[in-house]
Image (cartoon, rainbow, N blue to C red):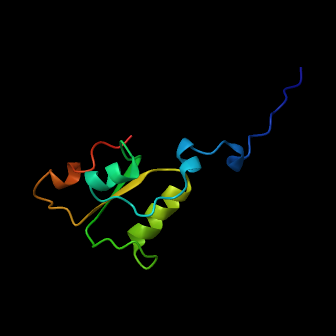
Amino acid sequence: MQATIKADRGLFSYPKYWAHCYGSAPFLPMSRAEMDELGWDSCDIILVTGDAYVDHPSFGMAIIGRLLEAHGYRVGIIAQPDWQNKNDFMKLGKPN
């Protein structure tokens, strides 16, 4: 008996995520109010940074956030949270 090996499916042959059809957001939200403005009920990924956040390619979080968004994820940013209080870390809600 001879075993046959099936070729793996191409990495980029999978369908796009559902959020891909909505296009990119004009800004990555940093508060619940900004999420509501975009019509989002939750974020898929929340990035936390100790630096200030500016949506410009010279800032690392902007590059990472926009890259994830280009792959169809809804990305939120928490910049400079108060590390002694959990409220800042909870302001965007629980990610998916």
Please state which of residues 42 and 83 is positioned toward the viewer in this rendering.
Answer: 42
Residue 54 horizontal/vertical position (percent): 35, 74
Residue 61 horizontal/vertical position (percent): 39, 67
Q: Which residue of the protein is positioned furthest toward the bottom in this rendering?
A: 58
Corner quadrant of residue 18:
top right
Left or right position of 76 against 10: left
Seen at 45% across and 64% down, the residue is 64
Q: Which residue of the protein is positioned furthest toward the right in this rendering?
A: 1
Left or right position of 86 against 41: left
Q: In the picture shown, does residue 71 fall above or below 96?
A: below
Q: In the picture shown, does residue 77 fall above or below 16?
A: below
Please state which of residues 22 and 75 is positioned toward the viewer in this rendering.
Answer: 22
Please state which of residues 8 and 77 is positioned toward the viewer in this rendering.
Answer: 77
Number of labels in the image equals 0
Corner quadrant of residue 47:
bottom left
Q: In the picture shown, does residue 27 fall above or below 8?
A: below
- Which quadrant holds the C terminus? top left
Corner quadrant of residue 75:
bottom left
- Which quadrant holds the N terminus? top right
Left or right position of 67 against 94: right
Residue 81 horizontal/vertical position (percent): 19, 62
Seen at 42% across and 69% down, the residue is 62
Residue 92 horizontal/vertical position (percent): 27, 50
Seen at 25% across and 68% down, the residue is 50
